[in-house]
């Protein structure tokens, strides 16, 4: 029984270490998610300095999270850790695409392939948000550029025809992305048609004004003779 108690002490020590690592990872994951959310909000507001600060802080947290869980792969691949890294992918890719910068890849972000793809799928929703902000002020070619990026992302996602156990539920995210893209395409088309209609009405109004010219009372020569 003394041997059993010694074994129990060893197990408790291991559990203490794993629990401390888990608690630290949870805290880091929450902070990482917060910085990613703030970076996305900043890029939508065109607050570039704030965006860069938040992305830098997120990058440091992502590195710390990976290093602290290097000895605990089961915790690294846990849902909350990969969800936070997915937000990290979404923030970096969203900011890069909106600012028309090169796409950050797997090597730069140092994430798993399925985490990267799921983060990429969620970028589509942020690009739609950006398109709608643009369309509030009328049709713009920038909205068309973003729609093209959304199509490009979907074209890649739809080719990842692998089991959900491999992609971590990517198929559902791909279906959501497709619906978002179709809605956005409809919004842009409606905005473009509205702009064409406004221009046509403006041209018609200008033509009517030019043909009618200034009108005023006139007196015929016969009327002057009678007077």
Image (cartoon, rainbow, N blue to C red):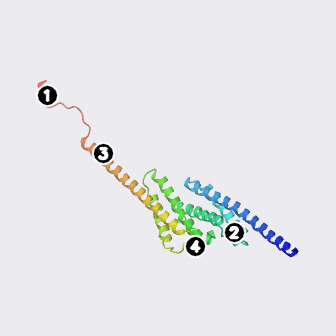
The tag earlier along the polypeptide, 4 or 3, is 4
Q: Quick one: label 4, few (<14), some, or many (20+) residues within 10 Å?
A: few
Residue drawn 46% across the image and 66% down it: 151
Q: CA distance from mark 3 to mark 2?
A: 68 Å
Q: Which residue is mark 3?
A: 205
Label pair 4/3, CB-CB below 8 angstroms: no
Q: Is residue 115 left or right of residue 187?
A: right
Secondary structure at numbered mark 4 = helix
Residue 88 on image: x %, y %: 62, 63
Q: Which residue is mark 2?
A: 75
Q: Quick one: label 3, few (<14), some, or many (20+) residues within 10 Å?
A: few
Q: Quick one: label 2, few (<14), some, or many (20+) residues within 10 Å?
A: some
Q: Residue furthest right?
A: 2
Q: Which residue is mark 4?
A: 165
Judge depth for marks 3 and 2 and give the one in front: 2
Q: Which residue is mark 1?
A: 223
The tag earlier along the polypeptide, 3 or 2, is 2
User: Which label was assigned to residue 18?
Assistant: none
């Amino acid at each position: 029984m003394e041997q059993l108690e010694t074994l129990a002490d060893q197990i408790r020590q291991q559990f203490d270490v794993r629990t401390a690592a888990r608690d630290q990872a949870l805290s880091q994951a929450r902070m990482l998610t917060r910085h990613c959310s703030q970076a996305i909000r900043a890029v939508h507001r065109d607050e570039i300095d704030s965006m860069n600060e938040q992305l830098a802080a997120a990058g440091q947290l992502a590195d710390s999270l990976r290093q602290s869980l290097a000895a605990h792969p089961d915790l690294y691949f846990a849902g909350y850790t990969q969800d936070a890294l997915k937000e990290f992918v979404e923030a970096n890719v969203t900011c890069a695409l909106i600012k028309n910068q090169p796409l950050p890849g797997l090597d730069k972000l140092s994430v798993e392939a399925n985490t990267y793809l799921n983060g990429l799928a969620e970028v589509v929703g942020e690009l739609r948000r950006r398109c709608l902000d643009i369309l509030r002020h009328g049709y713009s070619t920038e909205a068309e550029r973003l729609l093209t990026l959304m199509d490009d992302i979907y074209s890649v996602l739809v080719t990842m025809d692998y089991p959900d156990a491999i992609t971590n539920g990517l198929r559902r995210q791909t279906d959501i992305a497709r619906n978002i893209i179709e809605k956005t395409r409809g919004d842009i088309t409606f905005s473009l048609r509205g702009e064409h209609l406004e221009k046509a009405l403006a041209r018609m109004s200008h033509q009517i004004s030019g043909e009618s010219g200034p009108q005023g009372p006139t007196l015929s020569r016969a009327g002057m003779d009678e007077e």
